[in-house]
Amino acid sequence: MAHIQWFEKRAPFIAAVTALQGAMAERDAAIARSTSVPGHCPACDRPTVFQVSTSATFADRPNLREGLRCEHCRLTARQRLVALAMREEIPRMPSKPAGLLLEKTTLLYRFARAKWHWLIGSEFLGPQRISGRHYWWSTHWWRWRRTRHESITAFSLANQSVDLIAHSDVLEHVHDTALAALECVRVLRPGGVMLFTIPFFIDRDHSLLRGRPLADGSIEHLETPEYHGDGMSRRGIYTFHHFGWDFMDTLRAAGFSQVEIGLCHAPDEGLTSADPMGDSTWNIPPILFRAVR
Ligand SMILES: [Zn+2]
């Protein structure tokens, strides 16, 4: 099964990605041209068929990061990479761990909760809600669910109370990421781990701030507004950031002792770059982050 390679420094990470360029261009592009590909799923750990395209696309090309859905566990490539990281990380944790996954209405939560019963799931249901409380929530009138609300900038959790925080494509929607990082450090035990994905642009030194919230609740747009589908709201959710390398310094400044970027290119296991036939900007390699308290 594939393993995630972790890098603390930019140069060796870039060297590893550069070494994969040929394979990413060839293998990933062939996958992007297919409708389904056979392989082995490292999340549910069995032979499977990956359905290449979900509804997410780059113009006429499939977004492989949001695609490559396993026919068994139904996870997409992005979710599968988080699941793989959890599979690798959790066995190293204390015997009775506590942890938080910052999603609950998703297949990733369903997968993770079936495997690790102690994991708490939550969603962000809006700034007026109280962290730790459950609310009825629906995006469609026929499908109401009761969901725990947690805000990454104000958790309900006690100081040093969890061993794991996992989130996937959350932080780009949070304006004050430094505050979010401090809050995660607060609730993690020493040695506790945060695993997460973000849209990360490996050529970018500095993160791009796309907008900022104003006192009246509206947003001042500094770039063309970008919304991501989140399954929780119909329009999607506003994107404040395109992250670059300075974000690793933000995490270190918040108190994480070790911050790493992980790479796992394994096309046979449904882990590829996002847009191998497009321009390089959005062709995000299969990467995620690990920050140790
Ligand atoms: Zn699977």
Image (spheres, helix red, strand yellow):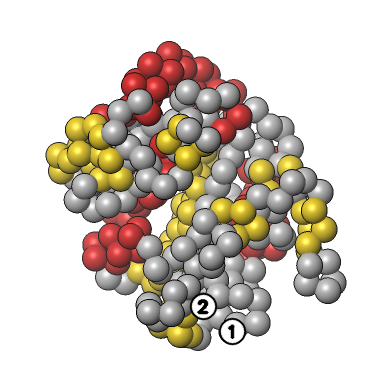
Q: Amino acid at mark 1?
A: Ile
x, y percentage for residue 123? 49, 71
Q: Is residue 50 left or right of residue 289?
A: left
- Dot 1 falls on a residue whose secondary structure is loop
x, y percentage for residue 53? 36, 40
* Position above or below: 213 against 216: above
x, y percentage for residue 181? 63, 59
Residue 185 in view, yes or no = no
- Dot 2 falls on a residue whose secondary structure is loop
- Mark 1: give few (<14), some (14-19) or many (20+) Cα within 10 Å: some
Q: CA distance from mark 2 to mark 1?
A: 7 Å
Give the farthest residue toward the right. Answer: 215
User: Viewer-proximal residue, 191 or 241?
Assistant: 241
* Position above or below: 49 against 217: above
Mark 2 C-beta to ligand 1 under 8 Å? no
Q: Say which residue appears at 29% left-offset and 33% top-offset.
A: 35
Q: Say which residue appears at 74% left-offset and 42% top-offset.
A: 208
* Position above or below: 137 against 219: below
Q: Hey, which quadrant is residue 270 in on the image? A: top left
Q: Are marks 2 and 1 in contact (CB under 8 Å)?
A: yes
Q: Say which residue appears at 39% left-offset and 72% top-offset.
A: 120
Q: Quadrant of the N terminus?
A: top left
Q: Is residue 154 left or right of residue 90?
A: right
User: Viewer-proximal residue, 122 or 190?
Assistant: 122
x, y percentage for residue 272? 39, 31
Q: Which mark is residue 130?
A: 1
Q: Amino acid at mark 2?
A: His
- Mark 2: give few (<14), some (14-19) or many (20+) Cα within 10 Å: many
Q: Hey, which quadrant is residue 218 in on the image? A: bottom right
Q: Quadrant of the C terminus?
A: bottom right
Residue annotated with mark 2? 149
Q: Is residue 103 left or right of residue 239?
A: left
